[in-house]
Image: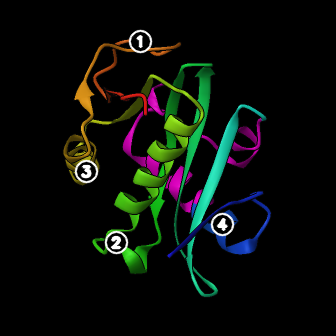
Amino acid sequence: MDIRIDDLTGPEIITLIEEHYKEMLSQSPEDSMHALDLERLRKPEIIFWTAWEGKELLGCGAMKELDPTHGEIKSMRTAPLHTRKGVAKRILEHMLEEAQRRGYHQVSLETGTLDSFKPAISLYTKLGFEYCEPFADYVEDPYSVFMTKQLTMK
């Protein structure tokens, strides 16, 4: 699996992000939905990765810098043909490695509360994330779960 920084201009990633955004909007009221569209993913404080096997897109993930010691996981998505193959785990591990390289002490995330989010929450838990209070600009919301992971400095 080749994980690399992506500029969000290729047709495969545009399609995957558009599908992700539509699905997230269908699962939460608009004011409770925190997925980012393409334009908001192209901000300088966000680094975006895609995972590939040859020319086939496997999935993606992004990390937003909240401050010099705290990153936020955003836009985790596996391509439909590659779910349950370890793609999301590998992308998340890659992002956590990058967070440590950047000197972050903490990485946090927001995800949904519906049953469809249970596999993601299970993955986050397995990789050491714990439930937490809302962070950054988030507020308590019945459609949101907040998780965080303290990073050990190497």
State how far apart marks 3 and 4 are (Cα): 22 Å
Measuring from the top left, give residue 103's x and y in whole percent: 55, 28
Residue 39 is one of the magenta-drawn residues: yes
The mark nearer the N terminus, 4 or 2, is: 4
User: Which label belongs to residue 83?
Assistant: 2
Observer-side mark, 3 or 2, equals 3
Note whether residue 25 is visible: no
Spatial CA span between label 1 and label 2: 30 Å
Q: Would residue 100 appear left or right of 81 to someone viewing this image?
A: right
| Pointer 3 residue | 123
Q: Which residues are magenta?
A: 17-43
- Going by the numbered disc 3, the residue's amino acid type is Leu
Numbered label attached to residue 139:
1
Q: Earlier in the sequence, mark 3 or mark 1?
A: 3
Label 4, on which residue? 13
Residue at 24 percent across and 37 percent down: it is: 128
Q: Secondary structure at mark 1?
A: loop
Q: CA distance from mark 1 to mark 4?
A: 30 Å
Residue found 28% across the figure and 23% down from its top:
142
Instruction: Give the farthest residue toward the bottom.
Output: 54
Q: Is residue 60 left or right of residue 5?
A: left
**Mark 3 or mark 1, whichever is nearer to me:** 3
Within-10-Å neighbours for mark 3: few <14, some 14–19, many 20+: some
Look at label 1 and name its amino acid.
Answer: Val
Say which amino acid is labelled 2: Thr
Q: Is residue 27 above or below residue 64?
A: below
**x, y percentage for residue 147?**
31, 28
The structure residue drawn at horizontal position 53% and vertical position 13%, both measured from the top left corner, is: 137
- Residue 115 placement, left or right of 3: left
Circle 4 sits in a helix, a strand or a loop, which is it? helix
